[in-house]
């Protein structure tokens, strides 16, 4: 082979390499992988012995691969051939179909001219059908006007069933004509034809309105007709049921006939049964309004509600015993009337509740809603037991009831506040009377104030309980608030009265000032019992429910009683004041002149204190005893009498013991079997008398120690005055006694009532003071 031929022979390989560069790359990769595998297998000379085995195995593998490749290529080529064959067959079929379509198009073009010639025939056929319908309906068409006039006369004469039968015939004729003009084939009816038919049958629409007006007039006056002649009402119900049956049949026919069904006639469905109950409810509302036009303000509201009750129950009896037999059972006309009445009542009472009602009016509404409406006289009537009243709902909502109760409490509070102001004014006027206060059957002073207030609050609570416990609790809570306010004003009035009396004690208007103070204390005791009784009436679940700061009239009562007792003690002190300056003086030591007068004043006051109820009577007696002891010791501390000898000390101590014994006889009522003599303030007089008449001054330290143990509030100034009164105490003994007192001053025990703390020691009358360490 020449060089040129060789060159030409190599050209296909180069071309294949250029066209399929992946082949060359794959061959290089295969050679590299083979060399790598061979270098790994034949890495030693002794491994070359198995070269023939490896060569044989690889030859077999290569042969197997070639066989599989050939098989795959062969199956691929067979599939390509089968596909080509299918494509050739499809092409042939498409050519046949195209030829058939061309032939069909030519046939259709030739037939189009024949269809145009049938249009005229179709118009003729349509006109023929319309003329046929007109000819067949001519007798009916000629009689439409006469039937309309006759039906109008029947309606005017209230022959409702006959009128409705004629009306049904007219409607059926109208529907048939419309259907015939519409055509059974489903062709649309022209607007002109439909308008023509409706215009010709326009009297039918007026008849429907006139008949409906008469039917609803009969239904609205059903209660009156039921008592006189229920026949028109029965006819109206039968007409309603006929209309319902027609509506139901037309709707069923329309839903089951598909596209070729008749259209609904004009004005259908009429739903006269629904309208029947609407008219019935409007009639109930109108009848209800005729009762509501009564006088409904002030005392007339209770009569108005009573008229509503009797009217509703009379109508319910008529409906249940008469109308129930005139309608089908599924109407449940009694339940319908009950629902209508309940809705009307709900709206009317909501309007009434929005008015500015007084307490009596609100009570009438609440009592009617909560008790009368559900009582056996109304909704709880035995004949209405089977009615499901739960679906009616409450006559007034819970929020509305709470608002009404709140308005009731506020109205009662206003009235109670006004009455309490008037009662307090009358009480203050009674204090100016020129006679003693009244007494009760036990002889205790009292006025009309507690009786009026107690009766007022208890009556309000009793009336509120007729509505419910919640309203009773709110009313009691309100009453306690107002009582607390009254007691605060009462205490202020006591203070003002005391000031006026101190300015002019001889005023004739204040002649019985003390008596009315004592009556005020008795009044507070009565009010306390009434307050506790009201608080006990409250239910436990309502405690703290109505307010974050509950009323505390008992605390106000306690403050008023304390103030009144203080004023009584002030009056006692005022009556004692003229005689106190002569106490513990030298004339008193000789003649004991002021003591009988002081005892007489005390006896007079204690006799008046017996007109006060316990426990305040006991309190006044104790306070008067305490006051007398304090004033007695205060007179002693003023050093009106300084002993000059042992006989004078003995005489002074003896007189003090006698005074203490005389005062003890006056206050003997306070010394019961369980009383402790050491705790009696009068015992202080005996202790001071023993201190003054002690013979040995050296024993004064021991005596002062015992005195400080019994009366830990005694001070050095008080002891120093006692030492001065004795008149025989040396400076050394005085210093020893005072030092001992200072070192052994015990703290005040719990529950101890100080007596020396209220007694001030007058300042010393020394002209000068030496600058000693003690004085400094």
Image: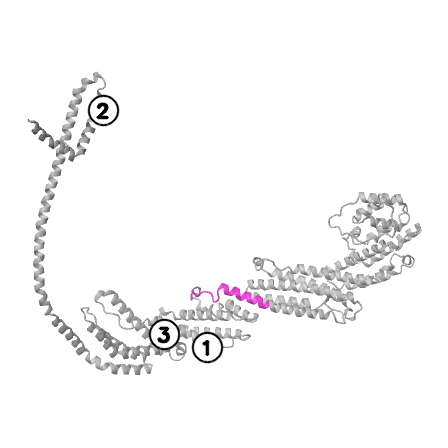
- Image coordinates of residue 683 in percent, x first then y, are 82, 52
Is the residue 666 above or below the residue 332 in the image? above
Q: Residue furthest front?
A: 4
Classified by dominant secondary structure, the portion drawn in magenta counts as helix
| Residue placed most toward the observer, 427 or 59 | 59
Using the image, determine if residue 645 lies above or below residue 504: above
Q: Label 2: which residue?
A: 36
Answer with mark 3 or mark 2, whichever residue precedes in sequence: 2
Q: Which residues are magenta?
A: 387-412
Residue 716 image offset from top left, x and y in percent: 82, 48
**In the depicted structure, whether residue 419 falls above or below residue 707:** below
Label 3 and label 2: CA atoms lie apart by 113 Å
Residue 766: x %, y % from top left: 88, 51
**Is 561 positioned to the left or the right of 764 in the image?**
left
> Circle 3 sits in a helix, a strand or a loop, which is it?
helix
Which residue occupies 82% across, 59% down?
666
Tell me how far mark 1 sits from mark 3, CA to CA. Answer: 25 Å
Magenta span has 466?
no
Return the disc, 1 or 2, that comes first in the chain's sequence: 2
Q: Is residue 114 left or right of residue 603?
A: left
- Marks 1 and 2: CB-CB under 8 Å? no
Q: Please give the residue where the numbered disc 1 appears in the rendered image.
A: 290
Residue occupying the point 51% across, 66% down? 370
How many marks on residues?
3
Mark 3 burial class by Cα count in 10 Å: few <14, some 14-19, many 20+: some
> Mark on residue 326?
3
Q: Is residue 453 left or right of residue 93?
A: right
Q: Residue 402 versus residue 43: which sits nearer the camera?
A: 43
């Amino acid at each position: 082979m020449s060089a040129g031929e060789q060159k030409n022979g190599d050209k296909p390989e180069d071309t294949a390499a250029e066209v399929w560069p992946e082949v060359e790359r794959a061959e290089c990769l295969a050679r590299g992988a083979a060399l790598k595998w061979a270098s790994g297998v034949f890495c030693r000379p002794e491994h070359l012995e198995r070269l023939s085995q490896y060569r044989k195995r690889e030859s077999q593998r290569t042969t197997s691969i070639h066989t599989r490749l050939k098989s795959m290529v062969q199956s691929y080529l067979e599939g390509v051939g089968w596909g080509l064959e299918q494509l050739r067959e499809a092409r042939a079929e498409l050519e046949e179909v195209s030829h058939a379509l061309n032939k069909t198009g030519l046939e259709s073009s030739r037939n189009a001219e024949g269809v145009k010639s049938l249009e005229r025939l179709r118009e003729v056929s349509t006109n023929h059908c319309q003329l046929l319908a007109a000819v067949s309906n001519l007798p009916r068409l000629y009689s439409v006007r006469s039937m309309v006039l006759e039906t109008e006369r029947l309606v005017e004469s209230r022959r409702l069933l006959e009128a409705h039968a004629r009306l049904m015939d007219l409607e059926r004729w109208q529907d048939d004509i419309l259907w015939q003009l519409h055509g059974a084939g489903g062709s649309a009816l022209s607007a002109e034809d439909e308008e023509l038919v409706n215009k010709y049958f326009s009297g039918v629409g007026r008849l429907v309105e006139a008949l409906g007006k008469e039917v609803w007039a009969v239904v609205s006056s059903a209660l009156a007709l039921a008592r006189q002649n229920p026949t028109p009402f029965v006819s109206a119900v039968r007409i309603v049921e006929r209309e319902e049956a027609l509506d139901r049949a037309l709707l069923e026919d329309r839903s089951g006939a598909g596209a070729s069904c008749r259209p609904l006639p004009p004005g259908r469905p009429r739903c006269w049964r629904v309208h029947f109950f609407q008219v019935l409810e409007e009639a109930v509302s109108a009848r209800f309004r005729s009762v509501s036009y009564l006088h409904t303000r002030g005392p007339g509201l209770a009569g108005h509600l009573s008229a509503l009750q009797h009217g509703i129950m009379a109508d319910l009896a008529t409906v249940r015993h008469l109308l129930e037999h005139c309608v089908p059972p599924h109407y449940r006309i009694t339940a319908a009337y009950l629902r209508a009445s309940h809705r009307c009542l709900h709206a009317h009472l909501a309007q009434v509740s929005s008015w500015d009602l007084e307490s009596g009016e609100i009570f009438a509404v609440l009592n009617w809603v909560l008790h009368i409406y559900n009582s056996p006289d109304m909704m709880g009537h035995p004949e209405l037991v089977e009615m499901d009243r739960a679906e009616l709902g409450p006559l007034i909502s819970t929020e509305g009831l709470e608002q009404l109760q709140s308005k009731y409490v506020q109205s009662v509070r206003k009235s109670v506040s006004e009455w309490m102001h008037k009662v307090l004014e009358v009480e203050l006027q009674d204090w100016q009377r020129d006679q003693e206060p009244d007494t009760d059957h036990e002889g205790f002073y009292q006025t009309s104030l507690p009786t009026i207030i107690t009766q007022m609050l208890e009556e309000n609570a009793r009336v509120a309980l007729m509505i419910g416990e919640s309203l009773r609790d709110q009313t009691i809570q309100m009453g306690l608030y107002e009582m607390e306010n009254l007691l605060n004003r009462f205490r202020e009035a006591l203070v003002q009265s005391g000031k006026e009396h101190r300015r002019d004690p001889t005023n004739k208007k204040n002649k019985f000032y003390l008596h009315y103070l004592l009556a005020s204390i008795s009044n507070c005791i009565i009010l306390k019992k009434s307050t506790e009784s009201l608080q006990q009436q409250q239910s436990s679940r309502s405690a703290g429910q109505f307010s974050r700061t509950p009323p505390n009239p008992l605390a106000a009562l306690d403050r008023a009683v304390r103030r009144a007792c203080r004023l009584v003690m002030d009056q006692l002190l005022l009556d004692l004041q003229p005689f106190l300056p002569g106490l513990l003086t030298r004339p008193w030591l000789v003649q004991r002149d002021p003591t009988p007068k002081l005892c007489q004043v005390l006896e007079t006051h204690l006799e008046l204190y017996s007109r006060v109820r316990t426990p305040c009577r006991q309190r006044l007696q104790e306070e008067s005893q305490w006051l007398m002891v304090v004033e007695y010791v205060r007179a002693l501390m003023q050093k009106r009498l300084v002993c000059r000898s042992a006989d004078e000390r003995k005489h002074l101590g003896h007189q003090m013991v006698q005074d203490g014994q005389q005062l003890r006889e006056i206050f003997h009522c306070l010394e019961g079997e369980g009383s402790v003599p050491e705790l009696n303030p009068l015992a202080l007089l005996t202790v001071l008398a023993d201190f003054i008449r002690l013979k040995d001054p050296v024993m004064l330290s021991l005596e002062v120690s015992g005195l400080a143990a019994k009366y830990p509030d005694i001070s050095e100034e008080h002891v120093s005055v006692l030492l001065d009164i004795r008149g025989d105490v040396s400076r050394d003994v005085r210093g020893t006694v005072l030092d001992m007192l200072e070192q052994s001053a015990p703290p005040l025990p719990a529950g101890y009532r100080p007596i020396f703390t209220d007694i001030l020691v007058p300042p010393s009358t020394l002209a000068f003071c030496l600058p000693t360490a003690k004085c400094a």
